[in-house]
Image (tube, helix red, strand yellow):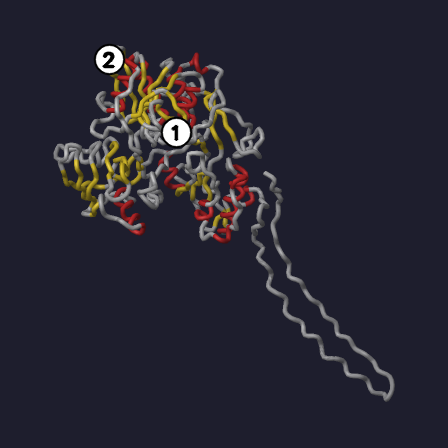
Amino acid sequence: MGQSRIVRIATTSAAIAASALVSACGGGGGASTPPPPPTQVSPPPPPASQGPTWTQNVFEPASTFKDQCQSPRSGTDIEGNTFPDQAGSLIEEKLWLRSWTEETYLWNDEVVDQDPNGFATAQAYFDVLKTNAVEPSGEDRDDFHFSELTTDFLIRRNSFGNPGYGAEFAIIRGGPPRDIRVAYTEPNSPASTPISGVVPLPRGARILEINGQDIVNGFNTQAQLPALNELLFPSTSGENRTFLVQDVDGTQRSFTITTADITEKPVLTTQVISTGGGTVGYIAFNTFSPFASQEEIILAMRDMQIAGVDDLVLDLRYNGGGLLAVAAQTAYMIAGSSRTAGNDFERFIYNDDAGNLNPIDGTPNDPFPFFNTVLNFGVPLTTNQLSFGQFLPDLDLNRVYILSTGGTCSASEAVINGLRGIDVEVVLIGDTTCGKPYGFVPQDNCGRTYYTIQFQGANNKDFAAYADGFVPNNSSAVFGVKIPGCVVADDFTKALGDPTEALLAAALNYRLNGTCPANTVAPKTLVASKSGPDAAGPALETSAYYLRDVRDLRRPN
C-alpha cells in the first residue's frame, strides 16, 4: 500500500528541572558579597496521558485494541459465550476499528486515515472507514458498510424472535405519497393469523395508516422519519397497533394486531407444479441465515427430489443473503455431484496486502467447495430428519430458473455466479439483482457487530465482476451482467407460489417456449427488513434496510 506499518505507542515523560545555588567569595575589606537569591523552580508539568494516540498512516496491530471497551460487558451472551470485554476506553475501541479496517478491508488503500478523536462514537468513526469510490454506473463501490447491536445479530443468527408484526414490507415509493405494500407474512404471526376469518396483512395490502398516523402522506421531515420507522418496524413486543390498509381489490379495512417476537422462516413455501412439459418444483427461499436455513432448504430440496421434478424455480426475490456455506449447499443440490466434483463454488479475492492468506484469521486463502453434506455450525439441528455429515439430496439439473428483484443480494448472487462457473444455465426472471460480489465475517467488539467488506467472490472460472448486478437479457439496462431471462414486475396481486403470479408464470412460460411477456417493466422495489430497534435506518427514501444482504464467510466446524 505504500504506507509503513509501525508499532508505536506515543508517550511522554515529565522533564524534571534541577537548580543549584551558586555562592561567590569576594576579596578585601573582610566583607563577603551576599549570595544571590535562590533560583525559582517551576513545578513539573503533569504527566502526559499514557493512553494510545493517533499518528496518521501508522497502524498498530488490531489485536492491541481488541475487546478494550469503554463500557465492558459481563456475563455471557445468548449462545453461552463469556464476553471477552476488558476495561478500556473509547479511543481504544476506535483504534481497533481503524487497524482492523487497515488489515482486512478489501479497499484498505482507498480509506482516508482520519483522526479518531474527531468522532463522538465508535459507530460514527466506523461509518467513514470505507472507500468513497463509485462504479462506472455511478453507484457507490461500497454500499454495504454497516453495523448493528451484537444482541440483534445473535438473535437473528439463532432464530430467536424479534419484535414485529410478521410482515415483510415492499417499498414501491418511499417518499410522500408513499406506496408501501405487504410482500409476504411469516406463518403463525400476528400479520398472518386471521381476524374474523380475514388475514390482517395479506400479500399486496397497502399500508394507509398505523395508529391513526398517515403513512402515505405524513412524516414529511427528516426529524419525523424515526417515528415512521417505529410504526413500521416496532421495537417492542406486546403493543397493540391499529392499521388501516387497502387490499388489492380496493377494499379498505381497519383492524388491531399485537406486536410479537417474530422468528423468520427461511423457506416460506414450496410447490410441485404439473405442466404439459413435465413437473416443475418451486421453492420460495427468503434467507440463507440463520443456521436453521440449511435444514429448511435441504428438506425442501429432498421433497423436490422425491417428486422427481424436471426443473426448478428458486424464488430468491426477497433473499438478501446470509451464510455462504448454505449457498454452496444450495448450488450443490441443484447441480448435483457430477457437475460440482472437483470444482470451486467460490474463490476469494482479498486486499493487496493479504498475499496468499486470509487477512481475517491468517489462514491459507482456501476456496469454498460445493458442500455436499449437512454442516455443523456449532449449534444442534432442530430436526431428527437430518444428521451432521449426511449427504445432501441431488437434483442433477443443468438449468435453474431464479426469480429476482433488487433485493436478491450477496449469497443469493453467489448461487447464480457459482452455478454459472460450472456451466449450469441460470435463467433470471424479474429484475436486476442488487450487485454485491462482496462479503465479510461479522465481527463483534464491545457489544456492536461490524460488517466491513473483506473479500470479493469469484466463481470457478474466476469471474467476479458483477457489482452492477445480474440482469435479465431483455432488459434495456446499460450496466450489469446480462444473462438469459425476462424483466418482469413483482406481482403483489397473487400469492407466492401461485402459478399465475407474474414472475412464476413468466418462468413457466419461458421454460416451454423461450419467450418473455410483452411490455413488462419492473419498477425498483425495496424490500424493507427490520432486524431490531437499532436497524431501522434514517430514511425510507434511501434506506432499504438490507440488514440481511450479507455473504457471511463463516465456515462450519
- In the displayed structure, 178 sits above or below 249; it is below
Mark 1 / mark 2, whichever is N-terminal:
2
In the image, taking residue 381 as reference, residue 492 lies left or right, namely left
Callout 1: SS? loop
Q: Which mark is residue 478?
A: 1
Q: Residues within 10 Å of mark 1 (few under 14, many from 20)?
A: few
Q: Which one is nearer the viewer's eye here, 81 or 353?
A: 353
Q: Position of residue 21 (x, y in %)?
A: 75, 74
- The quarter of the rendered structure image containing the N terminus is top right
Q: For the view shown, which residue lies furthest in the top direction?
A: 277
Q: Which one is nearer the viewer's eye here, 113 or 135?
A: 135
Q: Which mark is residue 275?
A: 2
Q: For the view shown, which residue lies furthest in the right direction?
A: 28
Q: Are marks 1 and 2 in contact (CB under 8 Å)?
A: no
Q: Residues within 10 Å of mark 2 (few under 14, many from 20)?
A: few
Picture quadrant where residue 380 is located: top left
Q: Position of residue 32 (x, y in %)?
A: 81, 84
Tell us which disc is closer to us: 1 or 2.
1
* Identity, as a three-letter code, of the amino acid under mark 1: Val
Residue displayed at 83% across by 87% down: 31
Callout 2: SS? strand
For the image shown, how many numbered marks are present on the structure?
2
Q: Which one is nearer the viewer's eye here, 250 or 183?
A: 250
- In the displayed structure, 74 sits above or below 398; it is below
Q: Distance from label 1 to label 2 (Cα)?
A: 35 Å
Picture quadrant where residue 78 is located: top left
Q: Is residue 36 visible?
A: yes
Q: Position of residue 48 (x, y in %)?
A: 59, 59
Residue displayed at 34% across by 31% down: 406
Q: For the view shown, which residue lies furthest in the bottom direction?
A: 29
- In the displayed structure, 64 sits above or below 419; it is below
